Image (cartoon, rainbow, N blue to C red):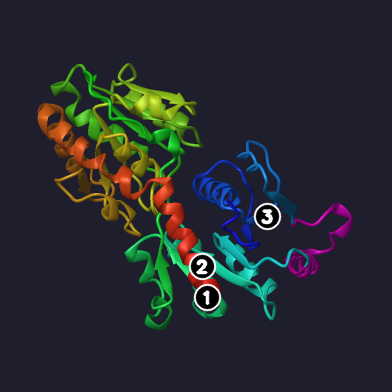
Amino acid sequence: MNDGKNRHVAFYIGSLKKGGAERVFVNLARYFVSRGYRVTLVTQYEKENEYPLPEGAGRVISDLTREEEGNRIQNLFRRYAKLRRIFKELRADLVLSTIGKNNFMAILANLLTPTRVVVSVVAEPTEEYPGAGMRFLARTLFYLADGIVMQTRDAVRFFQPSLQKRCTILKNSVNPAFLRPRYEGRRPQDLVAVGRMDENKNQAMAIRAFARVAGEFPESRLILYGDGPLRGRLGQLARELGLEDRVLLPGAVDDVAGRIERAWAFLLTSFTEGMPNTLLEAMSLGLACISTDCPCGGPKDLIEDGVNGYLVKPDDDEGLAARLRELLSDPEKADRMGREAAHLQESYSPQRVNREWEAYFSGIWLA
C-alpha cells in the first residue's frame, strides 16, 4: 500500500546508538517505510551498537570527514554548511529532529526551503537546554519550526505561552517485545529496575529503600538490570548494607521483557525523566510499579497514584520503602495494580501511536 503518496520524511538525530530516542526514531522510520513513504535517516555519527537500519530506509552521515575538518570555529560553520547541503539534496517534505542542538541545526539548515521542520524535545527541557544561552535559542528559534513535539504536559510549560500553543504532545509507542499477555503464574518477590547506572537514575535509592524492608521479607530480592559508571559503587553499597546476596546486578541483558515479566514489582528511581520507556514497558507487562514523581512529569502522566502504580518523591528512601512494604505484604494489591497498569498496552500500542504521528505530519503538510 502506497499511502505515503510519494512523501519523503527525513529523521535527524545524533546517531542510531541504542537508546530511548533512537529506538523511537527507528520504529517511526520503519512504520513510515511500511506506509509507502520515502524515508531517510540523517545522523551526525555512525557508532557501534546501533539499531539496524529499517529495511527500505536510506541513511546519510553528516559529520565532517578528516579532509573536511578545520579549526573549531571553521568546523561549526562547515558542519552547518554540510548539513544544509544534505537537506537540499534530499528535498524531504518533512524533517523530524530531536535532542538539544540537533533541533537548532535542523531549523537553520532548512531555512528558506520548502521542507517542513518538526522539532521534538524528549527529556527534561531545562537539561536538554542548559544555561541561559541555550534556553534563549530554544525559546526563539522554535518559532521558525513548523511543529514542536513534546512528551509531557509539564515539559510544555518550559516555553512561553505563545510557543506553548504550538506544542503537541505525542506518545512513544511500547516496544513490541513488551506486548504480550500478562503473566498469570506465581511470582517470586523480586523487585526489578532497568536502566543505565548513573547519577540521574539513582538506583542507590532503590538499594537503600530495599534495605529498610529486606528483614521483613526474607524471600525478596532486588535485581538491577543495566550497566554504567556507577555499577561498581552500587555493588559496594549493597555489600555495606549486608545485602550482597539479595541485591543482584546482572549488567546489560538481552530479552529484558522475559526477565522482568514475572517480577513482583518494578521500580524507577530517577531524579528526572522525559517519558520513561522502561516504566511504560513494565506497566505494559502488567507489573505493579513504583516511580519517582520526577520532572518533567512523564511518570505522573502514566501512573494514577494508588490505582495503577505508586508515585513517590525523588530520593525519598522512606517513602519508597513504605510503598515496597505495602506491595510485598499485599499480593492482591500488587496484582490489582499490575492488571490496571497493563491497560496502557492499548493506548501506547505501536499501531495506534504510529497512526497519531502520521496524522500529525499530515496536518503539518496541510497547514
**Residue 334 visible in the displayed image:** yes
Q: Which mark is residue 366?
A: 1
The one nearer the camera, 26 or 363, is 363
Which residue is denoted by mark 3 in the rendering?
40
Which residue is denoted by mark 2 in the rendering?
362
Label 3 crowd (10 A; few <14 / some 14-19 / many >=20): many
Nearer-N-terminus badge (3/1): 3
> In the picture provided, is 309 more to the left or to the right than 120?
left
Q: Which mark is residue 30?
A: none
Label 2 crowd (10 A; few <14 / some 14-19 / many >=20): few
Range shown magenta: 62-88
The one nearer the camera, 186 or 180, is 180
Q: Give how far apart the Cα atoms at labels 3 and 1 are.
A: 21 Å
Query: Helix, strand or loop at disc 2?
Result: helix
The answer to if 258 sits in the magenta stretch is: no
Q: Position of residue 13 (x, y in %)?
A: 61, 56
Specify the principal SS of the magenta part: helix
The one nearer the camera, 179 or 231, is 179
The answer to if 75 sits in the magenta stretch is: yes
Label 1 crowd (10 A; few <14 / some 14-19 / many >=20): few
Q: Is residue 73 above or below residue 172?
A: below
Query: Helix, strand or loop at disc 1?
Result: helix
**Residue 129 visible in the displayed image:** no
